Amino acid sequence: MARVAFRFLNRAEVQSLLPSTATLIEVVEQGLRAHGAGEVVLPPKSHIHLDDRFNGHFNILPGFVAPVEAAGVKVVGDYVDNHRVGLPSEVAMLTLYDPATGVPRCLMDATVLTWLRTGAVTGIGARYLARPESSVVAHLGARGTALSNLKTLAALFPLREVRITSKRPESRERLAATVRETLGLDARAVDSAEDAVRGADIVVEATRLERPEILVRESWLEPGALLVTYGWVMAIDPALPFRADKLVVDDWAQCQHGGQLHPLIASGALRREHVHAEIGEIVHGTRAGRTDPGERIIFWHRGFAISDIVLGAWIHEQAEAKGVGTMLTLWDGPDE
């Protein structure tokens, strides 16, 4: 008799197992290092637009990470107007598989996981690409990933000021209040992107625009600044990737299928030779990160399954050890 069963983890159960910020960074960095070492399988993620009636899309992210012996697929819905019905703009599920047999190991809510792994990649990128003394952060956008970005940055840098802006005043005010209360930082909401960006050491562009709009001008970035960008729609000065001292991405192959700077790639203007490195190469030690305090650097991360899989595998391991979750039987019958 062959029985196939997997563990199901709902959102509350996943949240009960979340790692500390230090462990989160360590786990996600392991995935980036594996990517830089060529120890992963990473097909391009699929971007699926269903219908013009729905203001959103699905992303499907598959992958395999050899060092943790885990394969997985994340499906995430990204719907701008979900706040109108009391839902997060991103709703995700991750399925982990045994790479040796193909049977599912775990199905878990991955909404919070998505926020955390995105924040971890932002922080890890900054650790290698920002000046160590960076103390002023500008955050454009107040989406679910925003607090995770700021938590990881606060764990890695001596932050003294956080400036937050977003399209909806109530969102930026709420995020600023949360940052003050939970992180103890001097955080304030500002009315414009320019007010946030000018004089900042680290700029995070995490907006959710419906159409292109230039929110970060090349002239606003100080020497030595790091710009981290991962919004789907073009929100930065299109001259910046060419005028910055270094452009770093998470995965060049993924970049050719959509995202912030994809229009520049599609037009033929932005090519692989313009990219200094993938962040995994820097984490692995194959390529250098920041080498001069005056460099202006752009880090564009689209997000990939590797980060979801390593973090999901860590959470699954904790669930197994603690007996958290529900075992579901996919089938229990004779071999075919």
Image (cartoon, grey):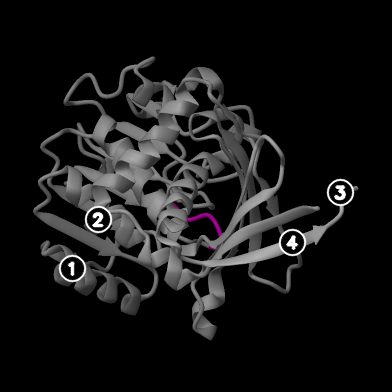
Relative to 212, say whether 199 is above or below: above
* Residue 66 lies in the magenta stretch: no
- Left or right for 249, reference 270: left
- Left or right for 275, reference 44: left
Please give the residue where the numbered disc 2 appears in the rendered image.
Answer: 151
For the residues labelled 2 and 4, the Cα–Cα distance comes to 38 Å
Front one among 60 and 214: 60
Q: Secondary structure at mark 4?
A: strand
For the residues labelled 1 and 2, the Cα–Cα distance comes to 9 Å
Question: What is the three-letter code of the residue carrying label 4?
Answer: Leu
For the residues labelled 3 and 1, the Cα–Cα distance comes to 53 Å
Please give the residue where the numbered disc 4 appears in the rendered image.
Answer: 330
Q: Which mark is residue 335?
A: 3
Region of the chain picked out in magenta, as a range: 210-215
Labelled pair 1, 2 in contact (Cβ < 8 Å): yes
Relative to 213, say whether 129 is above or below: above
Label 4 or label 3, whichever lies nearer to me, is 3
Q: Residue furthest top?
A: 286
Q: Residue, x 70% and y 64% (percent of image)?
A: 329
**Dot 1 surroundings within 10 Å: few (below 14), some, or many (20 or more)?**
few
